[in-house]
Amino acid sequence: MASQEGVLAAGPSFTIKIVLPEDLNGQPDDGEVRKGGDVLAGYLEVLIDSIVGLNIMVVLEESQYVKTTSIHRHQSKEGQISYQLPFAFVIPHKLISPKSDVASEYLNLLPSMKEGLAFKGPLTGRIYMQPNVTYTITATPLRIPARVGSAMRWKDRREISIMPSIPAAPPLQIDHFPCEYRTNCGKTLKQHFWSRPAGRVIVSAEEPEPLNISTSAPRATSTVSVKLSFEPCATHTPPVRPYEWNVTVKYYLRIRTFYTTRQYTQVPTKKTAKTEALVQKSSSTTMPEVRQCNTLSWRLQRLSSAGTITEDTEVLPWTTTLTVPVNASKTLVPTFLCPLSTRRYALVMEVSIANVNHDVMALEIPIQVISETTLPEKPSLNGAVGGSIDHELLEGLLAMNPGNGNMPSLEEAIQPPSYDEV
């Protein structure tokens, strides 16, 4: 929260407008996506007719005190006096809760998102949806002078987009999420539908590396290692040759969003979404991709589970590993957890073998979507990493307010007021 006090003009009306750096590009609707640690700098444009005292409060998260002087005053084309009052906030990495019993993982900054069906409250007239995470910066006069008539707009509100830094969490404990994931699958294989079983194929995979949407590449990428094992039947003739198989993998991301109107008592699962009336779940998928593997390096597993080498007379299992690249759009919302909503992802993989008969071998393994830059984070004016903070802030404010060479430095703009001045 920032408080700005100065001598402003009074008249029949006045307006307050929040101006941000993206407004200078002529395309303010595109919006700038910011992250924790970035400097959100801009100025208030106040149009009014004559001079009176007025206090203006700019609210984001922290407290600031900026004094306005005559250097901020300009004459507009319409004859009104225009004041351009700079402000700057540092977007925090974590939220602050007045309650001491809030878990630390619930205080992480969440990404901006609007999903789910919109509902208009009959009493309040407000639009509700789950989940709905928005960040706004608001400018409101704390005191309206008595001589000011009906104001055209006494306050202004701007919504900003935030994509915080969300690092990778430890691998998910699948045992805590019953019936939600499946990391291995075994099916009986036959040469034809009516023929005798030729053996059993087992497919397994573990949680891959996270998908990082903050990468400089066009898409977020990862790889998953799929292990295939074939245990042939000893009585089957002729012997099956797995090294001649053509394996096809179809895969896509499943997006699960849990939401509630009462704070979670535990991490939500598919089971709690069915048993608890206030917990709801929505699910969607991305477009599937298909990979065909015609040449795989199979090998006989001669080492037994006891660590000894098996004899040639025994039936030996065949094993191989298939590396599958996973691509995802950078518009995905990262994995997050908050008291009223949760987003999780799963990688669904369907493995099939051509010219043999078997049921679908499907895996559903957890995968994280994160937002983490590889470069060291430094506060910046426009959301970019690196650069001199004071130079960027001063250059941006001067560009927004030409002709004004006495702008406050970053330290003066974002520091809270001293106790003597309050």
Image (tube, rainbow, N blue to C red):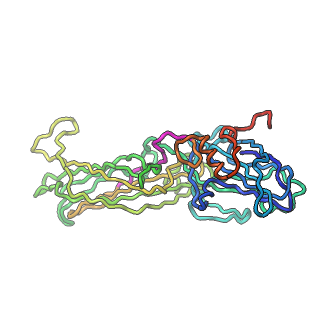
Which residues are drawn in magenta?
Answer: 363-378
* Lateral position of residue 60 relative to residue 250, left or right: right
Q: Where is residue 195 in the image (x, y as percent from the top left)?
A: 17, 64
- Residue under the point 44% across and 50% down: 216
Quadrant the N terminus occupies? top right
Residue 232 location (% of width, % of height): 18, 52
Residue 141 lies in magenta, yes or no? Answer: no
Q: Is residue 179 visible?
A: no
Q: Locate residue 77 relative to residue 301 in the image: left or right.
A: right
The single residue placed furthest to the top in the displayed view is: 420
- In terms of depth relative to the viewer, which is nearer, 144 or 408? 408
Query: Percent position (x, y) of residue 48?
Result: 81, 58
Residue depicted at 87% across the width and 53% down the height:
145
Residue at x 78%, y 33% (from the top left corner): 419
Quadrant of the image occupied by residue 199: bottom left
Residue 367 belongs to the span the image colors magenta: yes
The image position of residue 266, as x and y in percent, is: 55, 46
Q: Quadrant of the C terminus?
A: top right
Q: Nearer the viewer, residue 103 or 276?
A: 103
Is the residue 5 above or below the residue 13 in the image?
Answer: above
Q: Which of 42 and 407 is in front in this view?
A: 407
Residue 392 in view of the camera: yes
State whether residue 304 is above or below residue 156. above
